[in-house]
């Protein structure tokens, strides 16, 4: 039986397939950095439902159904950065805390949140946890080690994916990760890979959707080319 499609682009190795099949074959990796499918009830929203821009797209793409927590394993990774929705933390945090020695809860503050709140808070913050084992503690100087970053949500429309993370956020996170190799098993459009390649790390990405896989290949290849160009003119 043939294995998954693999693209090698400079320091990046990209797998097209299901991370639950591929991850166990990859052995020990320094860092996990992932933005997995969230788990929330998309039926809500009340009077504001129509304003919640891409909720329908997220649901249609199967990105509101959660994920298997066992992909976050302290046996495989030295550290892990994980984004999750508000409603996932109650079950996710005990799992993460059980796999690593220490963790910090960090935040991306959106400078342009949707102007809705209904019976909840405004969607102006996304939480991620950075967890690590001894030897993989957060990297960077004092200025880089803030627990939050402020950056706008959204993109210019050139990337066809409903939940693209901003590069400013991913660059901060990669800067704070200790380890040469970073793996994103829910790669989406490849934002983690672009930041990793830009900042001189090795990257392993996995994505099961063929369209998003192609997008990630294209973006990571462009980042790689840009890096080579900068080196050539330096
Ligand atoms: C929330 S998105 C990640 C978006 C990414 N951070 C970005 O900036 O584009 C999650 C991605 O995981 C993919 N996915 C979901 N389940 C998967 C699985 N079991 N294996 C591999 N990819 C999966 C989805 O197709 C989706 O593109």
Image (tube, rainbow, N blue to C red):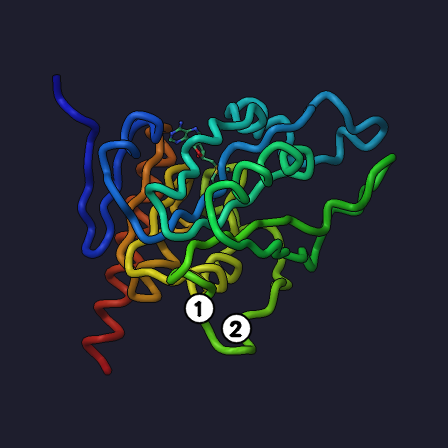
Q: Which residue is mark 2?
A: 144
The residue lying furthest to the bottom in this view is 234
Secondary element type, mark 2: helix
Coordinates of residue 137 in the picture (x, y in percent): 45, 63
Mark 1 beta carbon near ligand 1 (under 8 Å): no
- Closer to the camera in the image, 226 or 71: 71
| Quadrant location of the C terminus in the rendered image | bottom left
Q: Horizontally, is 1 left or right of 122 in the view?
A: left
Q: Quadrant of residue 177?
A: bottom left
Labelled pair 2, 1 in contact (Cβ < 8 Å) = yes
Which mark identifies residue 139?
Answer: 1
Q: Residues within 10 Å of mark 1 (few under 14, many from 20)?
A: some
Other-residue count near label 2 (Cα within 10 Å), few / some / many at <14 / 14–19 / ≥20? some
Label 1 residue SS: loop
Residue 27 against residue 149 in the figure, above or below: above
Q: Looking at the picture, tell me which residue is in the foreground, 141 or 163.
A: 141
Q: Position of residue 105 (x, y in %)?
A: 62, 54
């Amino acid at each position: 039986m043939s294995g998954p499609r693999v693209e090698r682009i400079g320091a990046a190795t990209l797998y097209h397939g299901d991370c639950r099949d591929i991850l166990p074959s990859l052995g020990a990796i320094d860092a996990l950095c992932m933005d997995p499918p969230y788990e929330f009830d998309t039926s809500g929203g009340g009077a504001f439902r129509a304003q919640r821009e891409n909720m329908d797209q997220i649901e249609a793409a199967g990105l509101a159904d959660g994920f298997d927590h066992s992909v976050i394993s302290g046996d495989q990774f030295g550290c892990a950065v994980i984004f999750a929705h508000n409603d996932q933390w109650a079950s996710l945090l005990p799992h993460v805390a059980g796999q690593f020695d220490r963790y910090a809860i960090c935040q991306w503050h959106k400078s342009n949140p949707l102007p809705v709140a209904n019976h909840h808070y405004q969607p102006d913050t996304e939480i991620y946890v950075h967890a690590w084992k001894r030897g993989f503690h957060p990297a960077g100087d004092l200025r880089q080690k803030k627990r939050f970053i402020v950056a706008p949500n959204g993109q210019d429309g050139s990337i066809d994916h409903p939940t693209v993370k901003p590069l400013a956020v991913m660059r901060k996170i990669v800067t704070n990760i200790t380890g040469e190799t970073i793996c994103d098993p829910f790669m989406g459009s490849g934002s983690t890979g672009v930041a990793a390649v830009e900042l001189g790390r090795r990257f392993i990405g996995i994505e099961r959707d063929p369209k998003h896989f192609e997008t990630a290949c294209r973006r990571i290849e462009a980042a790689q080319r840009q890096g080579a160009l900068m080196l050539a003119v330096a």
